[in-house]
Amino acid sequence: RPPPPAEDAIKAAEGSSDNVEVKKTAAQLVKALQRLFAQMAVSERKYVDPAPVMQKLLDGSGNPVQVGNQQDVSEFNHIFLSSVEQGLLALSSHETAAGGGGAEGKGEGAAAEAGGGAEGEGEGE
């Protein structure tokens, strides 16, 4: 017996569980990018570690992109921009579903987080 049409529609809208994980990770990538740029903008640190961003960047197979592997720059650019696009779409659809309004105030938490916390972390001589 085939599933009711409503269940088909729900499954199609949600996608596979792998697709949901990819969207979740892409949204986490966007949030990690926001934190990274906020830290660079407001921190007094000499450098900021981009590792949290790179850990959330997945290749076409769903595996983290390996730093140090020789890769075509256009391939990396495609992976990066596709992931950011997926993350932005996932976050905007989440905001819409949650009834969130506009983009005002977004990133303020990341900026506050970047300015506070572990002062002196990452500063070398």
Image (cartoon, rainbow, N blue to C red):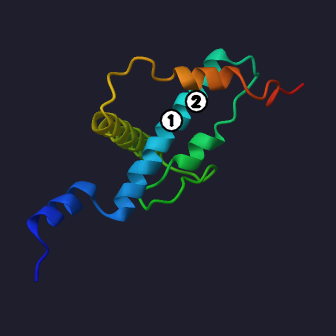
Residue 31's label in the rendered image is: 1
**Residue 94, quarter of picture:** top left
- Image coordinates of residue 12 in percent, x first then y, are 20, 59
Residue found 17% across the figure and 65% down from its top: 7
Q: In terms of depth relative to the viewer, which is nearer, 42 or 4?
A: 4
Give the side of residue 72 with respect to residue 86, left or right.
right
The secondary structure type at the circle numbered 1 is: helix
State which quarter of the image contains the N terminus. Answer: bottom left
Question: From what the image shows, is residue 62 above or below residue 32?
Answer: below
The secondary structure type at the circle numbered 2 is: helix
Q: In terms of depth relative to the viewer, which is nearer, 92 or 55?
A: 92
**Residue farthest bottom in this picture:** 1
Q: Amino acid at mark 2?
A: Arg
Give the side of residue 44 with respect to residue 81, left or right.
right
- Image coordinates of residue 41 in percent, x first then y, are 61, 17
Residue 94's label in the rendered image is: none
State which quarter of the image contains the C terminus. Answer: top right
